[in-house]
Image (cartoon, grey):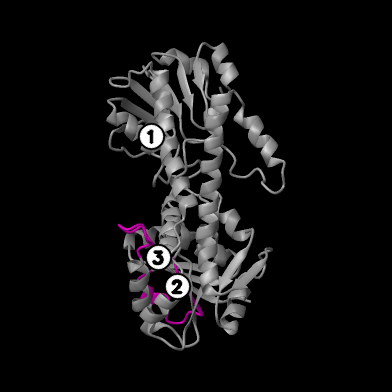
Amino acid sequence: MSSKIAIIGTGYVGLTTGACFAHLGHDVTCADIDSSKVDMLNRGEIPILEPGLDKIVKEGVDSGRLKFVLGSENAVTDCEFAFLCVPTPQGEDDSADLSYIQAAAREIGPLLPPESVVVNKSTVPVGSTKVVERHLGRSDVHVISNPEFLREGSAVQDFLHPDRVVIGCSNTTAAVKAQSLYLGVKAPIMVTDPASAETIKYASNAFLATKISYVNAIAAVCEAVGANVSDVTLGMGYDRRIGDMFLNPGPGWGGSCFPKDTRAMIKIAENAGYHFHLLNGVVQVNEEQFDRMVDKVENALGGQVDGATVASWGLTFKANTDDLRESPAIEILNRLAAKGAKIRAYDPGCKKQLENIEVVADPYEAVDGADVLCVLTEWDDFKWYDMEEVGGRMGHRRVVDGRNLLDGHTLKSKGFTYDGVGRR
């Protein structure tokens, strides 16, 4: 059964949500305030790097089920559902800034059809459904929570084949309507109260951040005692209570969600009178991991960072995306630049120049004359470059592998010094 859906905001979440709902057979209108972006999207072109998204956007546009308009007033007047997919950035006090979502609610409130359903898709604090209700100013419109669980680099797959769909709603009729949107999606649908749905999103991201900080701490222990973190995590992952996901040590966690949502979870707990010491520790361990990576580079350089040329393979916060927001790679490189290093970097997803970092278009150009090469994003391509050529171009054959992506034994046989994470 097809429904008329309006999507307010065509950022990462809004664009993926709109395109995927159109793929499921719904009639979707996405609204944005950027006219050039609207024109681009109506041509089937997308402004972000996300595998598979360009294909389903073009499919939706060509079929007529997906269109993009300028201004929310051109999207909501005949909709059955209006999804709020606007930014909720971190405020100065670490809480989520709801000004965009409040403004969107005020704008669409007078225009919505009676009995329509407004859906909070953005990541919002507990109690936000009531905030949206107040700003809509409509007693005949229902507000529900339907948090997104999209991973950059696999967002289309995550939407169409999710682990679960969570709907937070206090009105049974609205909950049933929302469930109908996901017909054809094979996943458990959990219906709960709005506060629980909103908490599920934050609790999930905070737990994943905790898991990464934990394995990075275990990697530090492995280095100290002479254990191999790859074997340790393999042994842990066989335990079904633990699982093997998010047990890869690295340079730290970042991106558009984990830092913001983890700090927001701490703030939500604090406002409710609970001091979340565990999660504060997770954030602290992540900061320490950035420092540990800087220390590894400094050790590889014999303690002389000032004046050294540091090459980096990787700038984005993870592979298969062009997202640089809160990237651990950039954080680490900036800290090295502050110590006087000259930074030159290559990343398949980044073409623009960055402050303190010279971005080049070729991985071999990045290592020309370099004193050390850092691997900071887990792009699969990095494994297949000619390391003999890399060594010939470098000033010194030194590698700090922050993703354990390269074969350290092979590199050592080629005359490189090699330092990974959690490997003595």
Residue at the spot 61% in from the left edge and 26% down from the top edge: 227
Q: Which residues are magenta?
A: 70-97
Q: Where does label 1 land, which residue?
A: 332
> At which x and y percent is residue 235?
69, 36
- Sequence order check: which comes first, mark 1 or mark 3? 3
Is 335 left, or right, of 54 in this rendering? Answer: left
Instruction: Select label 2 or label 1 by which is in front.
Output: 2
Q: Amino acid at mark 2?
A: Gly
Asked if residue 55 can be seen in this view, the reply is no
Residue 130 position, x and y percent, is 43, 78
Which three-letter amino acid code belongs to the residue tagged 1? Answer: Ile
Mark 2: few, some, or many residues within 10 Å (few <14, many ≥20)?
few
- Report the Cα–Cα distance between label 2 and label 3: 12 Å
Asked if 43 appears above or below 76 in the picture, the reply is: above
Amino acid at pointer 3: Asn
Name the residue that disc number 2 marks. 127
Residue at position x 52%, y 31% in the image:
220
Where 199 falls versus 415 (above or below)? below
Instruction: Return the residue nearer the eye: 156 or 415.
Output: 415
Q: Which residue is depicted at the point 58% across and 25% down?
A: 225
Q: Which residue is mark 3?
A: 271
In the image, which is nearer the foreground, mark 2 or mark 3? 3
Q: Quadrant of residue 331?
A: top left
